[in-house]
Image (tube, rainbow, N blue to C red):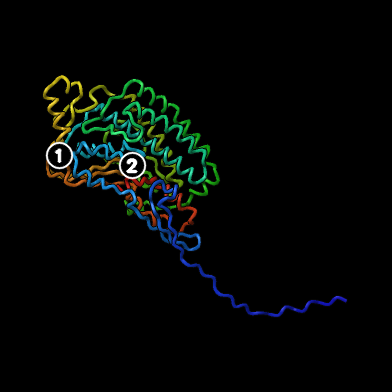
Amino acid sequence: MATENPPTKERNLHLPLLRTEELLLNLGPQHPSTHGVLKVILSLEGEKIIKSEPVLGFLHRGVEKIAENITYNQFIPHTDRLDYVCAMYNNFAYVRAIEKLLNITVPERAEYLRTIVAEVQRIIGHLFWLGTQALDIGAMTVFFYTFREREVLLDIFVDLCGARLTTSWYRVGGVERDFDEKIIADIYRFIENFHEKIAEYDTLLINNRIWLARTKNIAVISGEDAIAYGLSGSTLRGSGVDYDLRKVAPYGAYDKVEWTVPLGKKGDTYDRYWVRMEEMKESGKIIKQCLDQLPEGPYKAYLPKYVAPDKERVFTDMESMIYQFKLYSDGFDAPPGDIYCGTEAHKGELGFYIVSQGGGKPYRLKIRAPSFVHMGAFDFMAKGYMIADIITIFGTYDIVMGECDR
């Protein structure tokens, strides 16, 4: 006869309380997804980020100090090495600051040429960001698609100035070389088909559950907080703040063409992605209008005191040869004073503050690099999220360490 099991006796279980200790984790500076030599000290509670401390300086080269010891024109190639992914913007921002210091007016054709190349560089920068961000998150196919278009535009840069990355095409008073018919035709051809390419990227990402899970409601920052941290560019506009230097303080040919400023709503990583996608479409509109309206005229101001004369003049005119010799040996004499000039680069506001005491070299040059400013909000935007999100959060800024460390 089966017997019933005796009733279980009540037991008092005195289990220790579960505790998690704070874990310090060093991310970088060799991590491939930091896209440079960035180190981040993460304080973790389990997998939750409670603090993140970026450590900079691994790529410090003393660029600002170098500027104090060479002439204004000699510093142009050094600006290529700041944001080495999009060197044209560094050149553009720097020569605009010099022109403001010298009170130089740039010819109208040169302004259009500058605007076209700046927007081509914006597209290149956003394509590079989209490809690498998607690759880090797990959407590898997008990387190959975006780099396919990027190569086409870099080939145009090679035809224009002979270089893919370190360009040095912008000059004080204008540009180094005018467009030829091939360059104009190549840019037209690219712009005509570019909307279809953007649609391809959208097809791969906009309904991708992994992409949406890794970007929506991640690294949310309100417009007020974005302003408080000094954010700019797509990162700021992704939070719904309508601020773009191309509209607020127009330069180049931006006030002569029709275009809109895309704005996000939530201020999350997905909104910043959407803003960059829309900006590429707007860049295409700007480029096409500038090409359609491209005026005739010189591509460089004739101011031999400040701007090197054309080779044709140098070889045929003694005075031009003397001016060229002086400019390339001693530089031009800048008036005393100090100026700040900001330019809307694809990462945000890229500014140069120059103090002149006269002579051919700046007394002090300070670079407002958007990547450096954006790093200040890293802890704020990462706090409370999972460690798996840290690479997504880092990528949402589109940071290049060359301009962070300078």
Q: Position of residue 17 (x, y in %)?
A: 54, 73
For image coordinates 44% across by 32% down, the residue present is 149
Q: Position of residue 63 (x, y in %)?
A: 26, 45
Drawn side of residue 324 relative to residue 285, left or right? left
Determine the image quadrant of residue 322.
top left
For image coordinates 35% across by 52% down, the residue present is 375
Residue 101, visible in the rendered structure: yes
Question: Looking at the image, is 100 positioned above or below residue 6?
Answer: above
* CB within 8 Å, label 1 to label 2: no
Task: Find numbered disc 1 in the image and state the secondary structure of the residue it sits on.
Answer: loop
For image coordinates 42% across by 33% down, the residue present is 150
For image coordinates 44% across by 47% down, the residue present is 32
| Other residues around mark 2 within 10 Å, as few (<14) / some (14–19) / many (≥20) | many
Drawn side of residue 284 relative to residue 138, left or right? left
Task: Find numbered disc 2 in the image and state the secondary structure of the residue it sits on.
Answer: loop
Residue at the disc numbered 2? 83
Q: CA distance from mark 1 to mark 2?
A: 25 Å
Q: Position of residue 342 (x, y in %)?
A: 26, 42
Of the numbered discs 1 and 2, the one sitting upstream in the chain is 2
Residue at the disc numbered 1? 360
Residue 240, visible in the rendered structure: no
Q: Residue type at mark 2?
A: Asp
